[in-house]
Image (cartoon, coloured by chain):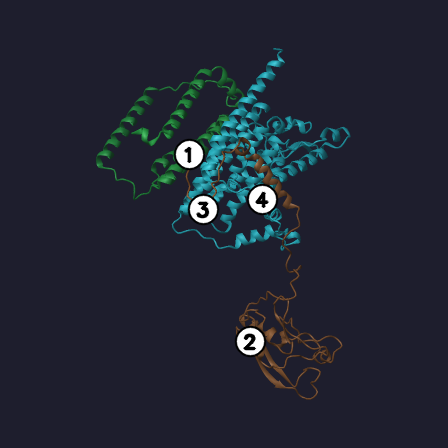
Chain colours: A cyan, B brown, C green
Amino acid sequence: MDLLLNFLPAIIIIVVMFGITMIAALYSTYGERKVAAYLQDRHGPNRAGPGGLLQPLADGVKMFLKEEIIPVASNKFLFILGPSIAMTCALMTGVVLPWGDKFTLFGRTFNLQATDLNIGVLYVFAVVSVSVYGIMIGGWASNNKWSLMGAIRASSQIISYELSMGLSIIALLMVTGTLSFREIVLQQHGGILHWNFIAQPLGFLIFLICAFAECNRAPFDLAECETELVGGYHTEYSSMKLGFFLFAEYINMFISSAVMSALFFGGFNFPGMDFLAEKGLDANWITLIGTAGYFLKIIFFIFFFMWVRWTIPRFRYDQLMNLGWKSLIPIALLNLAITAAVMVIRHSNNFGF
Amino acid sequence: MQTTSFSNRKKVLEQKPMTFMERIYLPAIVKGMSITISHFFKKKATIKYPEQKRTVSSVYRGLHILRRDENGAERCTACGLCALACPAEAITMEAAERKPGEESLYREEKYASKYEINMLRCIFCGFCEEACPKAAVFLEEDFAVANYSRDTFIYGKDRLVEKPKVGTKAFDIVKVGRTRELN
Amino acid sequence: MLQSLFYFLSFTSIFLACMVVFAKNPVHSVLYLILTFFTIAGHYLILNAQFLALVHVVVYAGAIMVLFLFVIMLLNLNAETEPRQSMLMKFAGTIAGGCLMLVLIAVFSKANALPAAHEVNSQIGLIKNLGKILYTDYIMPFEVASILFLIAMIGAVILAKREPKAAI
């Protein structure tokens, strides 16, 4: 019973987080269409419900009711496994993200976080690197040249950009000295100037660009480039299996926005936090405001993802590889060297040299 | 490089190598993003169609209407000139003689007892409007008719004839019922 | 609990490793290998080496096997294109495998008593301790390994960059 009580907050948080992730992804599809429309001087979906708010439900019902097609020549098991892996991996990352500070309820204090892994950043990295299998397996099992090309593009792109992403994170980790999301966020307490994007502007830029590539989002959405590859890796997919692929993309976008906000933009910290605490506001309220602030940051980044998608044209494939290998990795290494040098200088100053 | 140009207007464009600021692309990206975000707040170019409708020009050629005169009597005298003028052969009609007592319904002694326009054939050229000597047929602003079966697109008099105005004798006779918007 | 988990992971990893060899389809083979890596990562987790487990997943399952899969998918190997092995090859293979097995059996029969597992610090696999040891006690092998990787990387770049004319 005691064991259950210890795990109960985590279980509740996981369930709530699952629901929030799903809803966020669901409404990202609506948001995407709406943002696209507004950037193009249109109104966007406005028929289903007030302002089109029920559009995601209508889309979901449509997806579920479509005919399920499994190509005869495909490898049936792997064909179904592909979208499942994509979806599972997309949902797995959320457990280590810090959604809020301490919360006291019924005399028990717990963190608004499913689990605080001491290598949380690395965990996210591992899950992201595994999620490429969903696309690869799905693309190969379709037994279609376009799908295979899309899958190969996706995987090579993700591998290439993972490197510079890792290097940019290493520079950040050198500053913070920990791999736990919670500690990284807590270190950024105390005003905007303490947020990591001030200390690591170049690292943040590299991370941002790589996040776009890792999510297969425009301008790096070559894996589903419709002008060249029909539909890319999900050419042969229909019904909810296609829905899973598309859904996983939106969940990835949500998660990477959350990771970016946590690593570089202070997570659940917000300006005026100490001021409110001094005024005697209940700690629970501050936590809740912090969580709301965190979600605001996430929503801003999701908006940013969409804003970029509807502004910048798609890369050519050689440009993509050149950018990844010849620009981002050297810049990330430079960032790493500068960070190390600054740290050494600072450290030596402390000893009075 | 020697280039042949017969018109002497050919210009060779010199492509300069990109400067550093151009090569890092970020200023250009920021500029593009600021342009798109400015469109976010602009007035929308599209309208919410069924609720809002665009004003059409006065000479717009939409669905047909058979006009009544100021007393509410039908102007059409079934001369058949519109059917003759129609390049798509969309119009058919049958003429009938006006009975005594129907003066307030039909203006002339002869009227169209049946008047049909096949809207699937019609090309909305407006020749019928031009041909009509009695100023009975007009093409109005309505468009975009939709239905599930083809035969509903043959519009009879029930949907073509203008609704009589309130206060005219024709209004009292026709009452409600024969309106253009039956579908 | 931990022991049963260990046995479960061991048996699945051995089973999956066998499936790597027995699978007809090369892509299936690679997929089994990826699963094997995951079970090995599970072993690391049991040893409280979370960092190693995740790095194992990132590097082996996430990067190297993706490249493997990549190449095999592009080669499009299947049963029809596979060359038929001659009897001689099969014979040689059997003999070589048999010899290896003989050696292994001999070694294990000689090693009658496995050295008792000495006490190891269970916190050694955590990233902080691992980093400290790597950069103090094992700094030499670590640097040698990194130089080796650097040489391999430069070699790969040179091979890829070689002009087609210069090669002749």
Counting other residues with Cα less than 10 Å from the Cα at mark 4, is it few (<14), some (14-19), or many (20 or more)? many
The chain under label 2 reads B
Q: How far, Cα to Cα, is label 3 from label 1?
A: 27 Å
**Residue, disc 4:** A25
Residue at left 63%, top 58%? B49
Residues marked 4 and 1 touching at CB (< 8 Å) = no
Q: Secondary structure at mark 1?
A: helix
Q: Mark 3 highlights which residue?
A: A228
Where does the image place residue A91, in percent across and percent down from the top left?
A: 55, 40
Side of A185 relative to A70 (left or right)? right
Mark nearer the viewer, 4 or 3: 3
Q: CA distance from mark 2 to mark 4?
A: 59 Å
Q: Secondary structure at mark 3?
A: helix
Q: Which residue is mark 2?
A: B85
Task: Give the residue pinned by disc 1.
Answer: C65
Looking at the rendered structure, the kind of residue marked 3 is: Glu
Helix, strand or loop at mark 4 = helix
Viewer-closest of A160 and B125: B125
Residue A318 percent across, percent down from the top left: 45, 37
